[in-house]
Image (cartoon, rainbow, N blue to C red):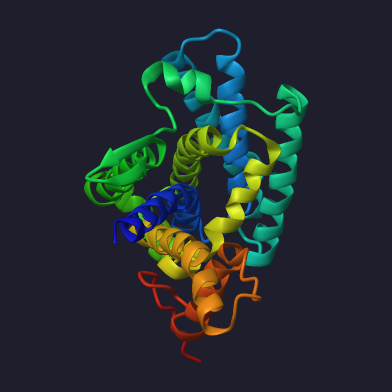
Amino acid sequence: MLFFAEVLIAGILAGTMYSLVALGFVLIFKASGIFNFAQGALVLFAALTFVSVLERGIPLWMAFVVVLFVMVVLGVAIERMVLRRLVAQSGITLFMATIGLNFFIEGFAQGIWGTQPHGLDQFLAQVGLEDVALNVSGVLVSQLDLIAGVVAALLVVATVLYFHRTRMGRAMRAVSDDHEAALSVGIPLSTVWAITWAIAGIVALIAGIMWGARLGVQYSLSLVVLKALPVLIIGGFTSIPGAIMGGLIVGATEKLGEIYVPILAEVLIGPKVQARGVETFLPYLLATVFLLFRPHGLFGEEIIERV
């Protein structure tokens, strides 16, 4: 039973890492209706910039502030220079624009910082953020995953409070409900979208630090965006709590499937069956089931069009 609890907790905590990436998608889609395929490249750019600044001898806290400013500027620049010019275009045009942004940001990062992999372990160890196992009542828990879970929870609380308690947050909710109605009551769409992209840049920095510490800062880091897709489908594209819940479900499904599906296949079919690698496709299989029976996700808004 302890082993099952250990696997389940490891999966849930790993799921919070997926949620950090999915949160950036939700913020952009909720405010502007754009599926930002470049979010993975933003995560990579943030992590690569952060570790490159650290390697130049800048203190950890100062490096975080510098890169935070860089990501805010980058997010605003993307909205002002690219997406604002495409406001009246179709959804597929905006989606293709974010694909182009994805390759541009990756190439831009490579041109500035080079192509060599980097490690964050030695820098994060200075403030006690090490990937070590903690013994909690007999259950081994990764310290880094535990910290990522706390950070993800704090981010969700902060974004929910921002959306519901601040004037700009309420304006962002109004824009997500109806762009034209929000514009008619004097809400500046361009300002709302710029702030949304700036927040997405901040989320990308935090996700990049967490994922960079776990996987290393390398160009495959941008592929973590693919794991965010089933999270979004399950949780809903417009729900911030849904991004977290979807991440927890995907993480738990992935870890439990990795351990128990091969055992179950061996018991039911025979020892010659090789059921390995199931963790790579099980989240997508679960997302397909959701698309068939609940296409708007657990917390997403159901769209009903009447003709």
Q: Residue 105 or 78: which is nearer the viewer?
A: 105
Is residue 255 visible to us here? Answer: yes
Residue 102 image offset from top left, x and y in percent = 69, 46
Q: How many numbered badges does the structure rendering display?
A: 0
Q: Residue at x 60, y 75 (%)?
A: 271
User: Which quadrant does the N terminus fall into?
Assistant: bottom left
Q: Is 50 above or below relative to 141?
A: above
Residue 294 image offset from top left, x and y in percent = 44, 81
Q: Residue at x 40, y 27 (%)?
A: 129
Left or right for 298, reference 50: left
Left or right for 218, reference 30: right
Q: Residue 69 or 235: which is nearer the viewer?
A: 235
Residue 256 image offset from top left, x and y in percent = 44, 64
Q: Is 42 above or below relative to 22?
A: above
Left or right for 155, reference 65: left
The residue lying furthest to the top in this view is: 57
The residue lying furthest to the bottom in this view is: 307
Residue 298 image offset from top left, x and y in percent = 37, 72
Is residue 34 visible to us here? Answer: no
Q: Residue 92 or 260: which is nearer the viewer?
A: 260
Q: Residue 232 or 29: which is nearer the viewer?
A: 232
Q: Is 271 above or below relative to 160?
A: below
Q: Is 137 above or below relative to 248?
A: above
Q: Quadrant of residue 218?
A: top right
Q: Residue at x 22, y 47 (%)?
A: 165
Q: Residue at x 74, y 49 (%)?
A: 100
